[in-house]
Amino acid sequence: MAVRRGHIRYLKVCEVENQGNDRDSHKSGSSVKQEEYDMPNGYEDHMGDEPSDAKTNLIINYLPQNMSQEELRSLFSSIGEVESAKLIRDKMGGHSLGYGFVNYVNPNDAERAINTLNGLRLQSKTIKVSYARPSSDSIKDANLYISGLPKTMTQKDVEDMFTQYGHIINSRILVDQASGLSRGVAFIRFDKRSEAEEAIKDLNGSKPAGASEPITVKFAASPNQTKNSQLISQLYPTQSRRFGGPVHHQAQRFRFSPMSVDHMSGASGMNVSGSSSSGWCIFIYNLGQDVDEGILWQMFGPFGAVTNVKVIRDFNTNKCKGFGFVTMTNYEEAAMAIASLNGYRMGDRVLQVSFKTSKSHK
DNA sequence: CGACGGGACGC
DNA sequence: CGACGGGACGC
């Protein structure tokens, strides 16, 4: 068992200082430190109808990647009897998402677990232990992505801007790795999706005090459609071959396309079409609203070097608008992908795949 | 630095 | 029928 009882000795040793300011500390959700352990919003008020686990169920964040559910249970069992322990894993790959739930039998043990295990260092991580909010659809998809922020704005500045719209669970400002300076991008997770929606309505396109450019406020992409997990899905392909590979005989699926094959193998006459210095851009049309980048990787990866994929999404819903782009390095491979995938049936849709045209004009 | 929402009580 | 993006999505 990788998690030893001895870890408990580290309790509270590593409480994290939150960027040097302690004022209003209960609102700074991003750091691991959590100084108030009262119940989540609204709980105190109607103890009669809350779920029975309101005072026993904990959410544990920032768990080490390799920690198993059994280790999670074991660690928290050192406090008291655990009714259940659940490590949340990726749906497809099954790897840990770095958080989980521990439900105690006894509320006193849950409170003690927060007091003693929150801030515990495990390997390179500092775990966060807090009461789990009651499970509900209304708390899902409440994470916002904010860009265009003045680089001078601190985490607290950003929280101050958003706090009037609801209860902020967590926030973060992205910083440049080298310089440590803000990239002008932040995430804010609200308690309720409706709160996030209000913030979008009010703040998207607005200018922070003293700023010259408006900010963008939108729902954050779900983690499985981020660049990072795209790479992971490339490294650990889950269900590729769904689309067949670059087999040699695929005439049966070939559709004639005015821009495919032959006579234009060099990039010479192709300035206006899909070519660019970085490869060949392919336009895919008639995608379903739930497709994500991973699907495009799976579709085009078998045909050769893919350097970029992009699903175009609606600003508000984050649903695919029906089309996307894929950039491939080599013309021959791109042409083969187009020849093979144009007319491909995906569910009840027939995809149209071609080199990207130039800007205007259909 | 570090992915905050599973699963199931169903009918 | 529809139809060609575009800072930055986690230091």
Image (cartoon, coloured by chain):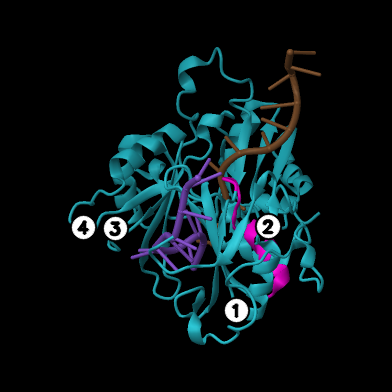
Chain colours: A cyan, B brown, C purple
Q: Earlier in the sequence, mark 3 or mark 2?
A: 2
Tell me which numbered mark, 4 or 3, is placed earlier along the sequence. 3
**CA gap, disc 3 and disc 2:** 31 Å
Q: CA distance from mark 1 to mark 3?
A: 39 Å
- What percent of the width, then of the height, locates residue A131? 56, 34
Q: Earlier in the sequence, mark 1 or mark 3?
A: 3
Per the image, the residue denoted by label 3 is A153
Q: The numbered mark 1 sits on a residue in which chain?
A: A
At x 61%, y 44%, the residue is: A60
Instruction: Give whichever of discs 2 and 4 has the lower sequence position.
Output: 2
Q: Quadrant of the C terminus of chain A?
A: bottom left
Residue A65: mark: 2
Question: Image quarter for residue A49?
Answer: top right
Task: Indicate left or right for A280 with A35 as reference.
Answer: right
Which element type, helix, strand or loop, lies under badge 4? loop
Task: Tell me if mark 2 has few (under 14), some (14-19) or many (20+) residues whose alpha carbon lies within 10 angstroms of its own.
Answer: some
**Between marks 4 and 3 in the image, the one whose residue lies nearer the viewer:** 4
Residue depicted at 60% across the width and 79% down the height:
A329
